[in-house]
Image (cartoon, rainbow, N blue to C red):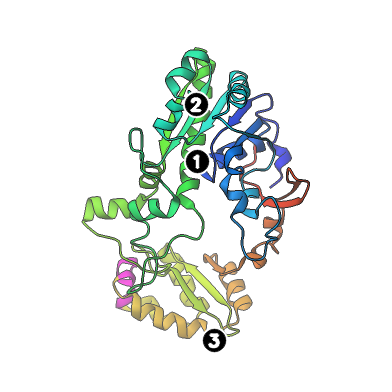
Amino acid sequence: MKREAHSKVLSGLKVVELASVLAGPAVGLFFAELGAEVLKIENKATGGDVTRRWKVPEEDASSSFSAYYACVNWGKQTLLLDLEAPGDWAVVWEAIGKADILLTNFREDSAKRLGLDYARLSKAFPKLIVGQLTGYGPGDGRPAFDVVLQAEAGFLFMTGEPGRDPVKMPVALIDLLAAHQLKEGILLALLQREKTGKGGLVETSLFHSALASLANQATNWLMAGHIPQRMGSRHPNIAPYGDPFICADGKPIVLAIGTERQFQALCDVLDLEEWKTFPLFGSNADRVKHRQELNEGLAKAISRMERAVFLQKCLEKDIPAGSIKDMQEVFETPLAKDMIIEWTLPDGSPARSIQSVAFNLY
């Protein structure tokens, strides 16, 4: 994955980013990686984007920026301004007037108070596309942080191990899902502007983006009345899928058996020929119903093989299986190394982050 393949496709496009934290800046990062000129304006009165100070214990407490901040702010010009100060507000207004896209995550009342509501912006700049992120939608001013949305949209309830407390996803995935929704909407607005010459408002909320991503878990309820329960990494519809196992050398793996052919091949790899005709495991539906017996047998068989040997045999049989890796192991792989960006933060300190654009465009 080489950024050069698509890094200039949006060259000449101007973006002003007034959003903070993760979702809005992730959209700004997307446009920056594709060659747009992105001006990030942070709140001077509060010391800039709050994520500047969100540091893990291993980071230098005295540094001006956190690794968290670096994850979504590559390639942007940064200004610290106070929108409550008339002089600074005028600088922002002038920048917006030259922009193609404005990204915001203001609450509705704050946008009006600051004179940056869509009604005023669209009247002053009819070609401007405004990308607006909210927590729950227009008119709902509840504060919205990712873990709260994970709770409100059902993710937290069904994440974790059976009989134990809910577990949040280890990245702010609702923010990132909302960012994807907003990117897609803005790209459509740009296409529409090419046809009509007019800008527009693209609005999405974290809540609606989360709901749109419930996929089969939503339809399991809507169509079958099934309320998803905490299952760890296991899958409610497929077995074995997401099930972790420990190999002979103590190294963990995960399986994702989605077809009958794959299950038959797994039986071959593990010398479990009798399972091919065993009634309890005869179909995916049977394996889901008898998951405990299935996993107990798989755990014994897999524990007799070292991870590298097992995964090689799975590869030869085209069986979906993988190592459970920590971050160090992930970024030791060539595919991951190709997506690392090395750059310099506004204070001159070095940064390394992961490319957010994961497609090639030739």
| Labelled disc at residue 304 | 3
Q: Position of residue 288 (x, y in %)?
A: 32, 69
User: Is-magenta flag for residue 285?
Assistant: yes
Which residue is at the front of the view, 100 or 97?
A: 97
Magenta span main SS: helix
User: What is the three-letter code of the residue carrying label 2?
Assistant: Val
Q: In the rendered image, which residue does mark 1 sit on?
A: 180
Q: Residue furthest left?
A: 225
Identify the magenta region: 279-288
The vertical placement of 244 against 191, above or below, is below
User: What is the three-letter code of the residue carrying label 1?
Assistant: His
Q: Position of residue 146 (x, y in %)?
A: 44, 51
Q: In the rendered image, which residue does mark 2 sit on?
A: 130
User: Is-magenta flag for residue 181?
Assistant: no
| Residue located 55% across and 28% down the image | 102
- In the picture, measured across the screen, residue 154 lies left or right of residue 57, that is left
Give the mark nearer the N terminus: 3 vs 1.
1
Q: Mark 1 or 2, which is nearer the eye?
A: 2
